């Protein structure tokens, strides 16, 4: 019998999860929940119904794992603990500083309801976190480096759009190749924020807007741009639609460490992602970890988990025998 | 109290394990076992005794985890099942075709004795296996690629040394950069053996040996070299000692996959290792997984495990709270 999945929130990430479910023969999408009027939401899977969020509790018997696809700012801090009272849940909560608090809230409710939850699944947090842990465990003496990009930062794009006179904007975070190469050499360089990434902004200005002022406001914006070398390109809406409609991303987690009785040998472990669609890849990670959540719930391993708690074998669709003979 | 480690077999890998133990504050080397006369074996850790293998069973109460550092051809198939009767054990068994049989032998004895074992730990098998599993689970529609090198293949070096007239030899496996780039592009190329790797051989010939014959014997050797573009360099013993005394290795596991309702987005996941010392890195992996074995044994999770069965958190020296707040 297939693992029955519900999607809670149907934006880019929800669609990414929906597409990923199709690629996994042991999974089945059974319902999509939205805050909008369900009659206005058209999904890509035939025969699956769209419900208003308020109806979720009527489907507790039909859903094995609920994948939450809302935002980390205001949706998930409320939704994940609440839904963990009724469902096994998976989310991609990515506000790093608030993860311990979110974990505690979800854990309390999941334990009380005998459900299994996993938070902060995706690639960062998620696969990047896992790779940091593995690499640190193997090379205790060393340094960690994370580079993001080249890819779209939604938060930075939003920040630009809030500037007066901006009609549309997309911001790409770009790792500095010289910094990446220095890290890959094993030299363990100390790198400032400015040395690691540059920021490229593609902006559609409103008619008559003061471009010089917009560019200046972007480049001097604290936290977002002031600490980076930022380039601003003004383009037309047509160019924007043609060249900047995708949501690529990626990056690298690199650990550079030493071994030997005198630290005489250098080693570099690199995990690199090159993603044409950030939401579809993140959705694919969420779906893989849903399998583990389902299995843990089935063996009564309840409460809140993180990617660190999941035995890798629980992510795989293949049998244990196949995995040992084919993959080890 | 520190985790008390025994090293069984003291060659390059044994020394790598010994060096790695020093980098882990929660571990302590308590004994080294050798087939040689123990009085002739000098180790690098002060105050630790070297014993003959035959004495191992006298130290069952003093060792929490025994790390086996013998070879896969003849040592480990016998030693790991046998020692699993008395110790929690870790090995780096790497004869891929015989892993299921080895697993079964170790599992049977470990379960009977209520010990925990883990086999085939290292980087391939080991970290490469883990990365294959994670990447396949995330991107079910795609292709896997493994490249090895640039690094020393012990087996190929040995094969050259067996040729008449060869005094010494070292063989480097080198990935073909064009093939790696084609894979990284997401194009999912089909690659022949010859297209993926080249082989470079540095050979010291005995005085008066027929170099042309040696080169020909190397290049046409079935299984080892016949399917590759192989280059042979004859060098002096002095050059050999100066330039080829290290044992570097590494490689890449790459998965290239697609997502989307029409497979319209490409993604590439790459795990890359660049290692100046293969035995020291492998030893470091063995030590990290010893921590997990110790913890699993402490919670009565007995029997034979693989890297796929280990929750990543069990590899980490830090507390759960630190890991969630610092690494996720």
Image (tube, coloured by chain):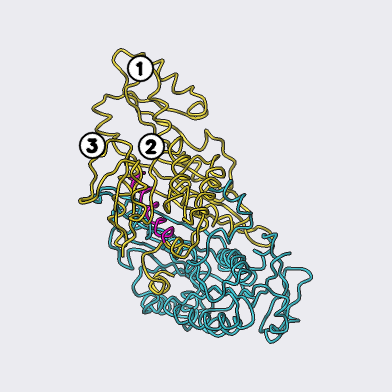
Chain colours: A yellow, B cyan
Which callout, 1 or 2, points at the residue further toward the start of the chain?
2
Question: Where A204 falls versus A103 (above or below)?
Answer: above
Q: Which residue is mark 2?
A: A152
A316 displayed left or right of A46: right
Image mark 2: chain: A
Image mark 3: chain: A
The residue nearer to you, when weighing B224 against B291, is B291
**Is residue B245 visible from the viewing direction of this image?**
no
Image mark 1: chain: A
Q: Which residue is mark 1?
A: A165
The residue nearer to you, when weighing A242 against B141, is B141
The residue carrying pointer 2 sits among few (fewer than 14), some (14 to 19) or many (20 or more) residues within 10 Å by Cα, namely many
Mark 3 residue element: helix
Residue B245 figure quarter: bottom right
CA gap, disc 2 and disc 3: 28 Å
The answer to if A277 sits in the magenta stretch is: yes
In the drawing, what numbered circle is on residue A40? Answer: 3
- Part of the protein shown in magenta: A274-294
Which callout, 1 or 3, points at the residue further toward the start of the chain?
3
Which residue is located at x 44 percent, y 19 percent? Answer: A217
Q: Are marks 2 and 3 on the same chain?
A: yes
- Do the residues under discs 2 and 3 have CB atoms within 8 angstroms? no
């Amino acid at each position: 019998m297939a693992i029955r999945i519900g999607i809670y929130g149907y934006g880019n990430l929800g669609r990414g999860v929906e597409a990923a479910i199709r690629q996994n023969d042991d999974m089945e999408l059974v319902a999509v929940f939205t805050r909008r009027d369900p009659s206005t939401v058209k999904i890509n899977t035939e025969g699956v119904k769209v419900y208003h969020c308020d109806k979720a509790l009527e489907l507790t018997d039909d859903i094995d794992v609920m994948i939450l696809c809302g935002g980390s700012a205001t949706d998930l801090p409320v939704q994940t603990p609440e839904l963990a009272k009724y469902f096994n849940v998976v989310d991609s909560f990515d506000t790093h500083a608030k993860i311990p608090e979110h974990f505690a809230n979800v854990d309390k409710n999941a334990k009380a309801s005998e459900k299994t939850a996993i938070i902060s699944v995706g690639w960062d947090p998620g696969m990047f976190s896992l790779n940091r842990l593995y690499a640190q465990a193997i090379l205790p003496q060393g340094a960690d480096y994370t580079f993001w990009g080249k890819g779209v930062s939604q938060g930075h794009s939003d920040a630009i759009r809030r500037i007066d006179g901006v009609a549309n904007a997309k911001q790409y975070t770009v790792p500095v190749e010289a910094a990446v190469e220095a890290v890959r050499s094993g030299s363990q360089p100390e790198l400032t924020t400015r040395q690691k990434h540059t920021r490229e902004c593609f902006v559609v200005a409103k008619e008559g807007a003061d471009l010089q002022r917009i560019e200046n406001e972007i480049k001097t914006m604290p936290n977002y741009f002031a600490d980076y070398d930022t380039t601003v390109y003004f383009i037309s809406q047509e160019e924007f639609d043609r060249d900047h409609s995708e949501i690529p991303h990626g990056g690298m987690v690199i650990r550079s460490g030493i071994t030997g009785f005198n630290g005489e040998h250098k080693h570099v472990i690199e995990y690199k992602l090159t993603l044409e669609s950030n939401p579809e890849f993140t959705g694919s990670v969420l779906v893989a970890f849903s399998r583990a959540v389902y299995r843990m719930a089935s063996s009564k391993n309840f409460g809140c988990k993180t990617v660190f708690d999941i035995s890798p074998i629980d992510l795989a669709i293949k049998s244990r025998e196949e995995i040992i003979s084919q993959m080890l």
